[in-house]
Amino acid sequence: MVRVGLAALALLIASSAAGRAPEFVVFEPQQGAMEGGKLQVEVKKFDHSATCPTKCKPCEAAMAKALEWLAKNQKGGAIEAGNGGTVVITCIAALAFMANGSTPTAGPYSKNVVQAMQYISRTVAPGNKTKGKSASGMEFEGFGNWDLGYAAIFLSEYYAQAPSPALKEKLEFLVQKMTDQREPNKGWGHAPNFAYKDLVVVSSACLAGLGSIKNLCGIAVPDEVIDSGWKYIESSSSGGTVGYSPRAGQKGWGHAGRASGAMWAMARAGVSNKFSDQVAKFCKQDVKNLIKDHASPTLHYLWGGLWAYMAGPENWKEYKTAFLDWWLSAQQADGSFKCPTEADVKAALGMDTDALVGACYPTAVYALVFALPYNKTNLHRTKIAKGTTKTTSGLGLGPKKDAPTAWLGLYVKPLEGMALQVTAVTKDGPGAKAGLEAEALIVEINKKAVKDVKGARELLAALKPGAKITITIMVAGEKKVIDITVGERPVAKADLPDPDADPNAEPPKKEEGGTPSVDGEEI
């Protein structure tokens, strides 16, 4: 039996890999922080696939249980967390659902993603002046900067996949609030006029959020805000380390957890210079010490994982080798996770933030970080403005926005396996502009026979909006060839969830006497 801090986990894993007898780690969290006062974890060795986490039984099973647990604990769009962490944890959990393949419109947790968006949009919104709490439980008036930063990161990812004017307004509001709530030295603290002033960890969250809004969504963020943000982080530094703050006694207090968060934030904001290079070098030298030196090692697991995956295969491999098997060993029977804080940190700070916030925190972080290799989000991408897909990871470009769908604005149905009959024509659509009318029979598209809807869609899938094609039709027994310019399928407003909607409300009932359904399928 060995009593060690989390920093020694890599050594235990290495010992197991070398064929030694399995060892146990006993964590002794703050009094009352966990049931029984102690958490004993055997660091097991798991049989991972070469393509882990894809087709990796232990990882896929653990992830499925974690996502199910998070979904069960989501109420009214929110995942309640202790010490005022509900907004932040809801954002991380929603990003975890998205990282595992659920989008605003599809996937097993699509509804959870949408409800999280609606909760965040209602909570972090103009006119909402509820009291907030810092991570240590101290109350303040107005919006916390943690909430603003994480709301910006999540809503930017959501907006990239399902843009809407209403959500754009929410993001613009976040830009203004984060701009207004800076301290005189241009850093961010827990909240404005709060006893505990600027902190690098909070500033990194806000800088990452602003960078996401600017570079992922293409929404304006003042250059001065971005520049002063990274320069504030630099003012805390000494030779590439990232301190707690620029204040005396905290500057240059180097640590890989803070540094990785700052590095990821700068990458999101498009900052690439001598300072960011120094920070990246420091991070690479200290990956295994990510979780030390903070009341919340879970925060450093999050930022370290985001940075490591973004930075490249070698860094991700080192991160995963050091920490993955421990995470899997620490999963609870119900699917949740616990992440104890080192005893020396608790003794110095007098708190165990992870335990105070609750199991939702480490569970959401696990489900997000170890799903990054699925490349279903933009979180590891850099230089992401204007549709580019550059990444430093080399592990894949991440999700690209769906290519515009070629569209004719016609409703059709098969006619005895010989042609497609036009049943309706969308007003002002490409077909209407070309003179097509209902009852026409489509027999060829670009001189290729068309007999069913699937065949027509396959032909259109190879085209881009703006392409000019020919359609051969039969009208009243007469064969005609017409030219048509392919359009882009519009996004129906009804398909975009209302950010201000209450996720608990019943969906509106359709009025009687509305528009009758159209016979046929749209192409």
Image: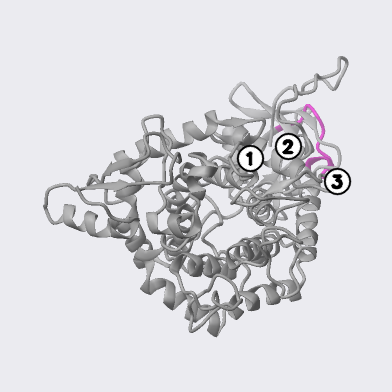
Q: Quadrant of residue 235?
A: bottom right
State if disc 1 and disc 2 touch (CB < 8 Å). yes
- What is the crowding at mark 1: few (fewer than 14 residues within 10 Å), some, or many (at least 20)? many
Q: Is residue 439 magenta?
A: yes
Image location of residue 292, percent across then percent down:
41, 62
Q: Residue at x 45, y 41 (%)?
A: 33
Q: Residue at x 69, y 77 (%)?
A: 227
Which is more N-terminal, label 1 or label 3? 1
Q: What distance separates the C-alpha of mark 2 from that of mark 1?
A: 8 Å
Q: What residue is shown with label 3?
A: 127
Q: What residue is shown with label 1?
A: 104
Q: Quadrant of residue 119?
A: top right
Viewer-nearest residue: 9 or 312: 9
- Nearest to the eye among marks 3 and 2: give it: 3
Image location of residue 490, percent across then percent down:
75, 44
State if disc 2 and disc 3 touch (CB < 8 Å). no
What amino acid type is highlighted by mark number 1?
Answer: Pro
**SS class, disc 3:** loop
**In the rendered structure, which segment of residues is drawn in magenta?**
431-441
What amino acid type is highlighted by mark number 3?
Answer: Gly
Image location of residue 414, percent across then percent down:
64, 25
Vertical side of 442 occupied by 289: above or below: below
Which scheme is used to colour this image of the protein?
one colour
Which is more N-terminal, label 2 or label 3? 3
Q: What residue is shown with label 2?
A: 497
Q: Quadrant of residue 55?
A: top left
Viewer-nearest residue: 39 or 224: 39
Which is more N-terminal, label 1 or label 2? 1
Q: Is residue 510 magenta?
A: no
Q: Which quadrant holds the C terminus?
A: top right
Vertical side of 64 occupied by 174: above or below: below
What amino acid type is highlighted by mark number 2?
Answer: Pro
